[in-house]
Image (tube, rainbow, N blue to C red):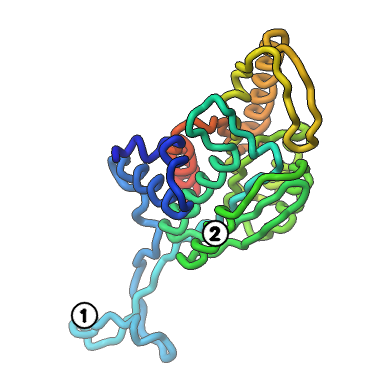
C-alpha cells in the first residue's frame, strides 16, 4: 500500500484495531519525511567527572580508566521530557458522520485515530503522554507516562470511547487546567460546539498556567459546506431536538457564521499563542502530524 493511502481516513475506516491504525499512520508519515526529526530526543552525553563512592559502577568509562588509571563517570545532559496531555471531546455531536461520504470517519473516529497516532509518536520520542475524555464533565483520566505498556492502556481507552450526552466543553477544560499542575503540551480534539466566549476563556486558562496548546477543530465536510438536500430535517445529536428547514435559504448565512466563528477562534488563539488547526474528517492525517511536529520542534 502506498504511503499516501496509509494517511487517508477512508483507508483507515476499513481497518480494525486502533493500535494498527496508529502504527500505520505514523509509519506512513515517517516514510514521507526526508530527514527524521525523531533523533536527539533521548539523553545526550555531556561530560566526565571523577568517580565518587556511591556512583553506579556501570557509569564508569573503562576506556578512560585504561588511559589515565583513574575512575571517571559519564555525566549526561538530559533534555526535559515533554509531558503531553490529549484531551478528547466525546460528547454526542462528535458521533456525526455524513452519510454521503463513503468510508467516512465520524468526528470521534477521526479524533481518536489522530490522538492514537500522536500518542504512538510521543512514546517513540521518549516523551510522556496522558489522556482525558469528557462531555459535560471529565469521564476518563490517565496521567502522562512514557512506557510502551502504558501506551497500550491509553490506546485501549481510546478504542472503547463512545460519543454521547451533551457538551460542557468550557467547564471540562477549566477542570483539566486546574488538574494539570506540571507544565506541558495540551492537545485538544473537539468540534467546539459550545459557547465561543466560554471556550476561549477556558483555553486561555491553560496558557495562564504556562501550558502550550494545540487545538484541532474537527468538523465533518458537510458541517462546513452545508450541502444538504432540500428539505432537510436536522436532529441535534446531544439534545435530540429537531428542526426542518430548506438548506438553500440558510446555507449562505450558515457558512458566513462558521467562517466568522473560525476567524474569531483563530484570532484569539493567535493572540494567546495557541496553535489553532481547523480540520475536516476527510483530510489526510499528515497535515495534523506536521502541525504537531512543528510545535514539538519549537519546544525543544
Q: Which residue is mark 2?
A: 156
| Residue 266 versus residue 146 in the image, above or below | above
Q: CA distance from mark 1 to mark 2?
A: 46 Å
Residue 250: x %, y % from top left: 72, 12
Corner quadrant of residue 183: bottom right
- Closer to the camera in the image, 129 or 104: 104
Q: Is residue 163 above or below residue 229?
A: below
* Number of other residues with Cα within 10 Å of mark 1, as a class: few under 14, some 14 to 19, many 20 or more: few
* Dot 1 and dot 2 residues touching (CB under 8 Å): no
Q: Secondary structure at mark 2?
A: helix
Q: Which residue is mark 1?
A: 63
Of circles 1 and 2, which is in front? 2
Say whether residue 263 is left or right of residue 150.
Answer: right
Residue lying farthest left?
Answer: 67
Task: Identify the image quadrant of the N terminus.
Answer: top left
- Name the element at disc 1: helix
Amino acid at each position: 500500500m502506498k504511503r499516501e493511502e496509509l494517511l487517508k481516513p477512508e483507508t483507515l475506516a476499513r481497518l480494525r484495531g486502533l493500535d494498527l491504525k496508529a502504527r500505520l499512520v505514523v509509519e506512513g508519515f515517517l516514510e514521507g519525511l526526508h530527514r527524521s526529526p525523531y533523533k536527539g530526543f533521548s539523553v545526550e552525553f555531556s561530560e566526565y567527572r571523577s568517580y565518587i563512592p556511591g556512583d553506579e559502577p556501570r557509569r564508569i568509562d573503562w576506556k578512560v580508566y585504561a588511559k589515565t588509571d583513574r575512575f571517571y563517570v559519564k555525566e549526561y545532559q538530559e533534555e526535559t521530557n515533554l509531558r503531553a496531555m490529549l484531551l478528547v471531546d466525546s460528547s454526542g455531536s462528535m458521533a456525526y458522520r455524513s452519510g454521503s461520504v463513503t468510508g467516512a470517519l465520524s468526528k470521534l473516529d477521526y479524533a481518536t485515530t489522530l490522538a492514537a497516532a500522536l500518542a504512538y509518536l510521543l512514546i517513540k520520542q521518549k516523551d510522556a503522554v496522558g489522556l482525558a475524555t469528557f462531555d459535560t464533565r471529565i469521564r476518563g483520566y490517565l496521567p502522562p507516562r512514557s512506557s510502551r505498556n502504558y501506551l497500550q492502556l491509553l490506546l485501549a481507552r481510546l478504542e472503547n470511547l463512545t460519543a454521547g450526552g451533551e457538551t460542557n466543553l468550557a467547564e471540562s477544560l477549566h477542570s483539566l487546567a486546574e488538574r494539570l499542575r506540571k507544565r506541558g503540551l495540551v492537545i485538544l480534539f473537539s468540534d467546539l460546539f459550545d459557547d465561543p466566549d466560554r471556550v476561549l476563556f477556558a483555553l486561555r486558562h491553560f496558557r495562564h498556567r504556562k501550558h502550550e496548546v494545540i487545538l484541532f477543530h474537527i468538523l465533518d465536510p458537510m458541517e462546513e459546506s452545508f450541502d444538504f438536500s432540500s428539505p432537510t430535517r436536522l436532529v441535534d445529536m446531544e439534545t435530540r431536538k429537531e428542526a426542518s428547514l430548506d438548506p438553500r435559504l440558510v446555507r449562505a448565512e450558515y457558512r458566513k457564521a462558521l467562517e466568522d466563528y473560525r476567524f474569531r477562534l483563530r484570532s484569539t488563539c493567535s493572540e494567546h499563542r495557541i496553535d489553532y488547526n481547523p480540520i475536516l474528517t476527510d483530510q489526510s492525517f499528515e497535515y495534523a502530524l506536521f502541525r504537531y511536529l512543528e510545535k514539538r520542534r519549537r519546544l525543544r
